[in-house]
Amino acid sequence: FSVILCGDEVTKRKPDPEIYQKVVGKLGLNPEDVLVLEDTGYGVQAAHSAGIRVIMVPSINPAEEREKEMAYAVVQSLDDVVQLFREGKL
């Protein structure tokens, strides 16, 4: 990994976008050029608030309507993410 940023390096926790903003800044990228995979609603909200495209792969709780609206896609597995790449949708 080019950048690793841990929870103790931010002052605000998800759903605040701080962690994503810091990572994008350290990488020198624009948020619109980044893709995040998230498994929770808090993570989806944080990425979305940072202006980053996010795909939700729910872990324990299924995606709620609000998360579906914020996410680029909600998929059932990481294999589904690979398929989106293969189909040229990402």
Image (cartoon, rainbow, N blue to C red):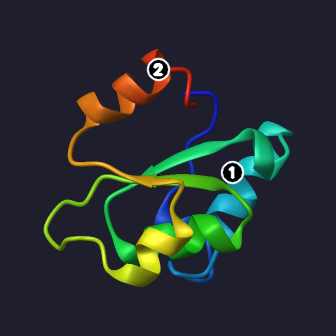
Residue 61, horizontal then vertical, whole percent: 17, 73
Element under disc 2: loop
Q: Is 77 left or right of 2, judged from the image as shown?
A: left
Work out whether mark 2 precedes mark 1 in sequence or the reverse, and give the earlier one: 1
**Residue 40, relative to residue 6: is it above or below?**
below
Quadrant of the rendered structure where residue 66 is? bottom left
In the displayed structure, 42 sits above or below 50; it is below
| Mark 2 lies on residue | 87
Q: Foreground: 47 or 76?
A: 76
Mark 2 or 1, closer to the camera: 2
Q: Is the N terminus in the top left, top right, bottom left or bottom right quadrant?
A: top right
Image spot of residue 76 (x, y percent): 21, 48
Compared across the picture, whether 65 is left or right of 1 comes to left
Residue 65, numbered label: none
The amino acid type of the residue labelled 2 equals Glu
Q: Amino acid at mark 1?
A: Val
Residue 35 pos. (x, y %): 60, 43
| Farthest-out residue, left | 60
| Image label count | 2
The residue positioned farthest toward the top in the image shown: 86
> Which residue lies under the disc numbered 1?
23
